[in-house]
Amino acid sequence: MKKVILSVALITAMCFSSCKNEAKKETKTVTTEVSKEVAMTAISFGVRGNCGMCKSTIEKAANGVEGVGTATWDVDKKKIDVSFDATKTDAMSVHKAIAASGYDTEKVAGSEEAYKDLPGCCKYDHEMMMNLAGEMKEKDHSTHNH
């Protein structure tokens, strides 16, 4: 009688372990990608700066904000174009991130500490005009020629 009970116990144990393995083999993970359209908000605003190094720092600061898709600063116009996911961030967060890197924006003054650490070529005039139209750069040079 003991042998029969022991045999049944062994067979049951073997069935459980093999049944579990078969169940694991049959389980497949199906991943479906759901692509949803993310509405990006596009904004432009003025940012003071001088050169290509400024461009790099300003764009890096803006792109570092979660939700920002693209950020492109125009050295001549002193203007940045930013697109972002409004469900993840807002315009003021982008202004603050750029200001934290040392650069003045239209709405937020640049961090004095960060400004002190900028390279010499990046020390911009705090009074310079920003968010300029393309023609503004060529301002009346002809009137000075007499």
Image (cartoon, helix red, strand yellow):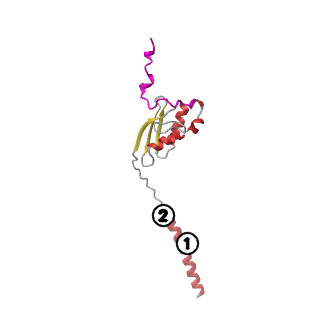
- Residue 10 position (above or below residue 22): below
Query: What residue lies at 42% left-to-right and 39% top-to-bottom?
Result: 43
Q: Which mark is residue 17?
A: 1
Q: How many marks?
A: 2
Q: Residue furthest bottom?
A: 1
- Residue 75 position (above or below residue 26): above
Q: Which mark is residue 50?
A: none
Magenta region:
121-146
Q: Which image quarter holds the C terminus?
A: top left
Q: Chief secondary structure of the magenta span?
A: loop
- Name the residue beneath numbered marker 2: 27
Dot 1 crowding, Cα within 10 Å, few <14, some 14–19, many 20+: few
The reply, left or right, for residue 35 in relation to residue 113 is left
Query: What residue lies at 43% left-to-right and 19% top-to-bottom?
Result: 140
For the residue pair 139 and 63, the one nearer the viewer reads as: 139
Query: What residue lies at 53% left-to-right and 68% top-to-bottom?
Result: 21
Q: Which amino acid type corresponds to the residue marked 2 in the rendered image?
A: Thr
What x and y, as percent, mark residue 99? 51, 39
Q: Which image quarter holds the N terminus?
A: bottom right
Dot 2 crowding, Cα within 10 Å, few <14, some 14–19, many 20+: few
The reply, left or right, for residue 30 in relation to residue 57 is left
Q: Which amino acid type corresponds to the residue marked 1 in the rendered image?
A: Ser
Q: CA distance from mark 1 to mark 2?
A: 16 Å
What x and y, as percent, mark residue 46? 45, 34
For the residue pair 130 and 61, the one nearer the viewer reads as: 130
> Considering only order in the chain, which callout, 2 or 1, is on the residue closer to the N terminus?
1
- Residue 88 position (above or below residue 48): below
